[in-house]
Amino acid sequence: SQTIHQWPATLVQPVGSPLSLECTVEGTSNPNLYWYRQAAGRGLQLLFYSVGIGQISSEVPQNLSASRPQDRQFILSSKKLLLSDSGFYLCAWRRAGRFSPLHFGNGTRLTVT
Amino acid sequence: DAKTTQPPSMDCAEGRAANLPCNHSTISGNEYVYWYRQIHSQGPQYIIHGLKNNETNEMASLIITEDRKSSTLILPHATLRDTAVYYCIALMNRDDKIIFGKGTRLHILP
């Protein structure tokens, strides 16, 4: 069966510090991978998605970036965090090209202080 | 992706059926209707999907109108644990970019 791992669960970082959130998927190959962010009391915002290694589509041109160094690994990064980067970050995967729901990880709650 | 519209919030008494509407009047023939829900502080969870026939699983039923311009998610016997935000999305299988709307916040009243 397929599983998605996302860590850490919670993170408190000072403004200006770097960020690295990691997501890995097991039990499937060549998944579509997604990063979403949810600010407090708000909806899900799509940040990045990837249809293959090294292929990243950005929906939010801010100080965040994403990378997919391996087929089932998706990393969200920032060189310098802003207060507005606080939120609930969710990684998700989906089989490409055919019926498949999105499967979400448990999320990382990031607080930038 | 076809745009979907949902009421921002709904109330339902515990034990009654919760009927959550979704309008997708611009849906194309290849787009499926997917429903997810998000319980507070968790990732969204897939509930059900359909193309044109009504569907039922252990969680819910999905009723799609004959013209496919709207659908209703039915939770047959709502419990307090069904309190969540419910999202309706229209997607083709080949769609890679998946955008969520604001969904419907369902409150189950004891």
Image (cartoon, coloured by chain):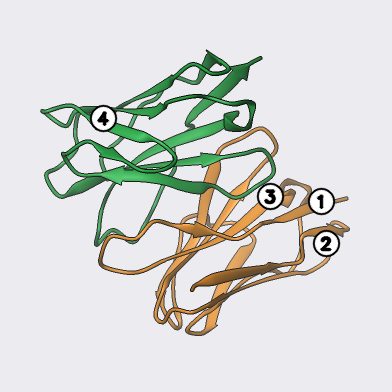
Chain colours: A orange, B green
Callouts 4 and 3 on one subunit:
no
Element under label 4? strand
Q: Splitting the image into 4 quarters, where does residue B73 fall?
A: top left
2 vs 3, front mark: 3
Dot 1 alpha-carbon crowd within 10 angstroms: few under 14, some 14 to 19, many 20 or more? some
- Depth check: A25 or A13 in front? A25
Q: Splitting the image into 4 quarters, where does residue A31 fall?
A: bottom left
Callouts 2 and 4 on one subunit:
no
Q: Which residue is drawn at 26% across and 40% down?
A: B55
| Residue A111: x %, y % from top left | 81, 51
**Residue type at numbered disc 3:** Phe
Circles 1 and 3: CB atoms closer than 8 Å: no
| Residue B70: x %, y % from top left | 24, 27
Q: Name the residue under label 2.
A: A16
Which chain is disc 2 placed on?
A
**Residue type at numbered disc 2:** Gly
Residue B14 is labelled as: none
- Depth check: A6 or A61 in front? A6
Q: Height in image: A41 above or below A58?
A: above
Q: Name the residue under label 1.
A: A111
4 vs 3, front mark: 4
Tell me the distance, in whole angstroms, between the alpha carbons under discs 2 and 3: 19 Å
**Residue type at numbered disc 4:** Ile
Residue A88 is labelled as: 3
Circles 2 and 3: CB atoms closer than 8 Å: no
| Residue A99: x %, y % from top left | 28, 60
Q: Which residue is drawn at 64% across and 61% down?
A: A63
Tell me the distance, in whole angstroms, between the alpha carbons under discs 4 and 3: 32 Å
Dot 4 alpha-carbon crowd within 10 angstroms: few under 14, some 14 to 19, many 20 or more? some
Dot 3 alpha-carbon crowd within 10 angstroms: few under 14, some 14 to 19, many 20 or more? many
Element under label 1? strand
**Residue type at numbered disc 1:** Thr
